[in-house]
Image: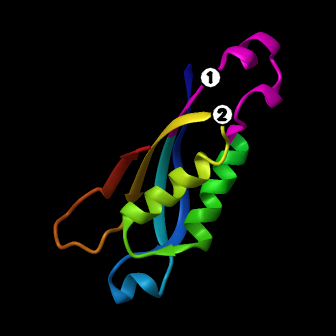
Amino acid sequence: MGRIVIAGLRELGVHGALPEEQSRPQPFEVDVELEVDMKAAGDSDHLDDTVDYSAVAEAVSRVVKSERYHLLERLATRIAEVCQADPRVASVNVTVRKLHPPVRAMVDHVAVHIQR
């Protein structure tokens, strides 16, 4: 087994529980870590023998920018579902960061992390 990592994918999306978050896009950052059996790809050197990280990145971007959720937990779960559509993905870790959260404290970001 091995891991395919997509780190720091940034996309604008409309996600949040507050009314002002539901009216305008804001920036999100996503990390995805896929556990995949890499033996066949390591032996063959063929893209068809592994999970195409470019296709995964496009699918994750599409979820963030075109779907809408109130909670980061649901957004992260939806991203995990999309990643696990490929049966070669044994497990997935997803971190979703809201880069400009509506909190009074000065924070770099807020995030959720899930494992499936």
Q: How is the image coloured?
A: rainbow
Q: Is residue 62 left or right of residue 22?
A: right
Between 52 and 39, which is closer to the camera in this rendering?
39
Q: Position of residue 86 (x, y in %)?
A: 67, 42
> What secondary structure is marked by label 2?
loop
Real-space Cα distance between discs 1 and 2?
A: 7 Å
Residue stretch rendered in magenta on the structure: 33-53
Whether 4 is drawn above or below 92: the answer is: above
Residue 1: in magenta span: no
Q: Position of residue 110 (x, y in %)?
A: 29, 59
Q: Which residue is mark 2?
A: 88
User: Measuring 37% from the left and 87% from the top, which residue is drawn there?
Assistant: 20
User: Measuring 74% from the left and 19% from the top, which residue is drawn there?
Assistant: 41
> What secondary structure is marked by label 1?
loop
Which residue type does callout 2 highlight?
Arg
User: Measuring 78% from the left and 26% from the top, which residue is drawn there?
Assistant: 49
Q: Position of residue 35 (x, y in %)?
A: 54, 30
Residue 40: in magenta span: yes
Between 6 and 44, which is closer to the camera in this rendering?
44
Q: Which residue is mark 1?
A: 37
Label 2 packing within 10 angstroms: few (<14), some (14-19), many (20+): some
